[in-house]
Image: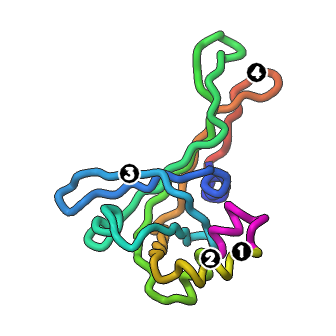
Amino acid sequence: MSAEWALEVLDKAPYITVSMADDEGMPYGLPLSLVRTDEKTFYFHCALEGKKLDILSKTPRVCLSAVTKCKPTVGPKDGSFTLEFKSAIAFGTAEIVEDDTEKIAALRAICERFLPHHMDAFDASIARSLGRTAVVRITLTEPPVGKRKQYDKEGEEMKAAIK
């Protein structure tokens, strides 16, 4: 599937698994609430210290993956057990945001995505917690890709042209 399609999957996923590896090659992945602000930029927030920040400060390469519309099903034509899904994967580089203006903009975007009906409390929350909140920017290093398995109303598997 196209990069645009994959970005839509990433946008709609309730969380995105961010995978990284420490400087000894030990994998570490965790589901996080990310927001995308343009074609290449994602943000997440976290505490000022912890394992992910320790890893990212030394080894900033990451892999993002997400799945939506995941539903076990029986294949309509052949009765096989299968799974319908939409998925996306992307690779990028993570960097801890130091500039307060960018941090606030990223936190605003995160809040607008996940708590849009509570933006009236945003400024007070920033005043309370900006100093104890880290923000990480992930910049994609190549276009994301996606896959899907879905059936149309006639029971045919939907195929897509790769762009």
Query: Percent position (x, y) of residue 68?
Result: 63, 42
Query: Percent position (x, y) of residue 112?
Result: 71, 68
Quick one: SS at disc 2? helix
Tell me the residue at 52%/67% (across/down).
Answer: 44
Quick one: SS at disc 4? loop
Give the distance between the C-alpha atoms of the residues marked 3 and 4, in whole angstroms.
Answer: 36 Å
Give the distance between the C-alpha atoms of the residues marked 2 and 1, in whole angstroms.
Answer: 6 Å
Of the numbered discs in the image, which one, if any, rests on residue 121? Answer: 1
Query: Which quarter of the rendering shows the C terminus?
Result: bottom right
What amino acid type is highlighted by mark number 4?
A: Gly
Query: Percent position (x, y) of residue 30?
Result: 42, 51
Frontmost of labels 1 and 4 is 1
The disc, 1 or 3, on the residue closer to the chain's N-terminal end is 3
Q: Residue furthest left?
A: 24
On screen, 76 above or below 63? above
Viewer-proximal residue among 77 and 35 = 35
Magenta span includes 114: yes
The disc, 2 or 3, on the residue closer to the chain's N-terminal end is 3
The disc, 1 or 4, on the residue closer to the chain's N-terminal end is 1
The chosen color scheme is: rainbow
Residue corresponding to mark 2: 125
Residue corresponding to mark 4: 155
